[in-house]
Amino acid sequence: MPLITYMVQAGDTVYKIARRFGVNPQEIIARNGLQDPDHIVPGQQLAIFVQETEPPVPPPGTMVYIVQPGDTLYLISQRVGVSVNRLAAFNNLADPNRLFPGQRLLLPPEAQPPVNQPPPGYFWYPIHRGDTIFALASRFRTTVPLILQANPGIEPVNLQIGQNILIPAVGLTIPVFRGNPGKKTVALTFDATYGDNQTDTLLAVLAENGIRATWFISGIWAENFPALLQKIQAAGHEIGNHSQTHPHMTKLPPVEMRTQITEAARMIRAVTGMSTGLFRPPFGEYDQTLLDVAAGLGYRTIMWTIDTLDWQNPGPDAVVQRVAAGLQNGAIILMHNAAPDTATALPRVIQEIQRQGYGFGTVSGVIDP
């Protein structure tokens, strides 16, 4: 039964938040001591205790499935060969889109046995079109022999789309501050957490210059601005995970860390239909526990080489100067879609990067060996 820290967004009401999390509005009011529940403000943090519904005792012929980090009802339905509607009805789920790690689901008699839970230090990865063992080893910072060792009997030249294989997570537990030092390319990144702000302008500038960037999206931003997220996707930009509500994650227990990442992944997937493999911690705060949790979900934690400090509103000149002074091969540049100076500074930032002879890539492209 997870306790979630939720940051109030513009337009929120206690009733809307309660509906979103499937809880009673009075419980939110009482737990947070709200004197006037009609007046909550953006940025205010609310503690929400989410009740977990247990299925009945399994009758003969059925199985129990324990929800894993990153699971959705659709993914589970694909894994066990039962439709989403059948699973939702069989478990009396009020909201099929809201699952929590550790939740128990009852599988109907016709379900296939699900894939076993991964052993410590590994995570399950479903094969996608174009995947190879070598490419996966490079992407997840492990080796081909270690992947083959974890999956005895696997046929490396005959991978099947949807096939689940074990990937060692140890290579993902080190944060990335810079890409390949042998590549004269840099990555522009934009964190999107709250408002729409400069997003349309930033997308227009990037399009004019033929640049693909990486956008780290919070779950609440995906929920509030789905059309903008679809624009980002349609423009060919890379999308990363920036947590669900942008909390101070090192102050959370591991179960809430997982929920923050998996809920954001669920919201991004609901809008774009795609999964994410890059995670940027809110405020740039991390500890080894958070790194391990993210790695266990298949995420690489991405930091930055250059902080433009655009969030401090230092003026466009200062933003450009910080980028110019910090450029180096593989640099990852941090900006924010909500910072007023960013849209004004971006054309000059691009010109300066080009003047110094650097090319542009997404984070994945820049950190690729």
Image (cartoon, rainbow, N blue to C red):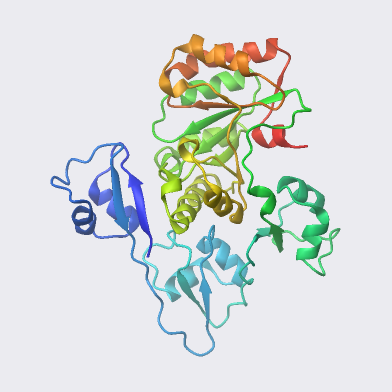
Quarter of the image holding residue 116?
A: bottom right
Residue in the foreground of this view, choosing between 367 and 106 = 367
Residue 221 vertical position relative to residue 87 in the rendered view, above or below: above
Give how far across and how far down residue 120 sits, in percent.
63, 64
- In the picture, measured across the screen, residue 249 lies left or right of residue 273, that is left
Give how far across and how far down residue 26 sits, in percent.
19, 57
Q: Quadrant of the C terminus?
A: top right
- Residue farthest toward the front in the current orientation of the protein: 288
Give how far across and how far down residue 163 sits, in percent.
71, 63
Residue 267 vertical position relative to residue 187 in the rendered view, above or below: below
- Residue farthest toward the bottom in the current orientation of the protein: 60
Residue placed at 63% from the left, 49% from the top?
A: 173
- Residue 130 in view (yes/no): no
Residue 268 vertical position relative to residue 169 in the rendered view, above or below: above
- In the picture, measured across the screen, residue 120 lies left or right of residue 59, that is right
Quarter of the image holding residue 322?
A: top right
Q: Quadrant of the N terminus?
A: bottom left
- Residue farthest toward the left in the current orientation of the protein: 35
Residue placed at 50% from the left, 50% from the top?
A: 261
- In the picture, measured across the screen, residue 44 lies left or right of residue 346, that is left
Residue placed at 47% from the left, 52% from the top?
A: 257
- Residue 199 in view (yes/no): yes
Residue placed at 50% from the left, 9% from the top?
A: 317
Q: State the count of labels.
A: 0
Give how far across and how far down residue 112 sits, in percent.
62, 77
